[in-house]
Amino acid sequence: MTTISEMAERWRRVNEQFTEMQGEAMTEQKEQIVGVIVNQQQSEHVDSSGSPLRPYSPRYKLLKQEIGKSGDTDFDLTGEFHSEADLIVDGETYLVNSPALTDKGELKSEWLQKWNEKAGSKASIMLPDDENKGVIWRIIRPDVVTKIADTTGCTVA
């Protein structure tokens, strides 16, 4: 039998550890989360505010179309940028980033962020929009619920 005080203490721990629990769940599901961001770029063509990514120049769009791509802004030419993308979780902060480099040795994710900002957007190209935040929550929710149950001693039905 658990006393009310003991259960209150367990829930206090959940409250203190909730951000850490979310971070652990995100790390455990990082491939799916990275996939959400890649899909947002490749299929939805939007940044974290839901605004369209900056259009390619007519010349670059034509180049992409000539090699069989759509010409829509999707940050995908060689596949390297997306295939190397990874999730970084640090406390309350998370970001999908890619170690892929431009031909000048710059991180592509930073270069693309600056490039997109030239269209007037201050939103991140490497974070989810509101709709995809919901998708990510549905991915990590079962792990978070299990972690809460483990901490409180409650069972998950």
Image (cartoon, grey):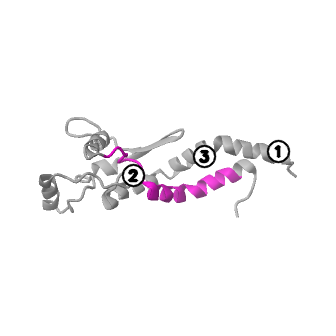
- Residue 136 appears in the rendering: yes
Amino acid type, mark 2? Ser
- Where is residue 44, by image quadrant? bottom left
Return the residue nearer the eye: 48 or 37: 48
Amino acid type, mark 1? Glu
Q: Which mark is residue 17?
A: none
Secondary structure state at the residue bearing disc 2: loop
Mark 1 or 3, nearer chain start: 1
Q: Which residue is mark 1?
A: 6
Amino acid type, mark 3? Met
Q: Which mark is residue 49?
A: 2
Q: Which residue is mark 3?
A: 21
Residue that appears at 16% across and 61% down = 65
User: In the picture provided, is 99 more to the left or to the right than 118?
Assistant: right
User: In the picture provided, is 4 more to the left or to the right than 19?
Assistant: right
Q: Residues within 10 Å of mark 1 (few under 14, many from 20)?
A: few
Viewer-side label of 2, 3: 2
CA separation in Å, label 2 and label 1? 43 Å
CA separation in Å, label 1 and label 3? 20 Å
Return the residue nearer the eye: 92 or 155: 92
Q: Residue 145: x percent and y percent?
A: 64, 55
Mark 2 or 1, nearer chain start: 1
Secondary structure that dominates the magenta span: helix
Residue that appears at 82% across and 45% down = 6
User: What residue range appears in magenta?
Assistant: 121-149
Is 28 a magenta residue?
no
Return the residue nearer the eye: 34 or 129: 129
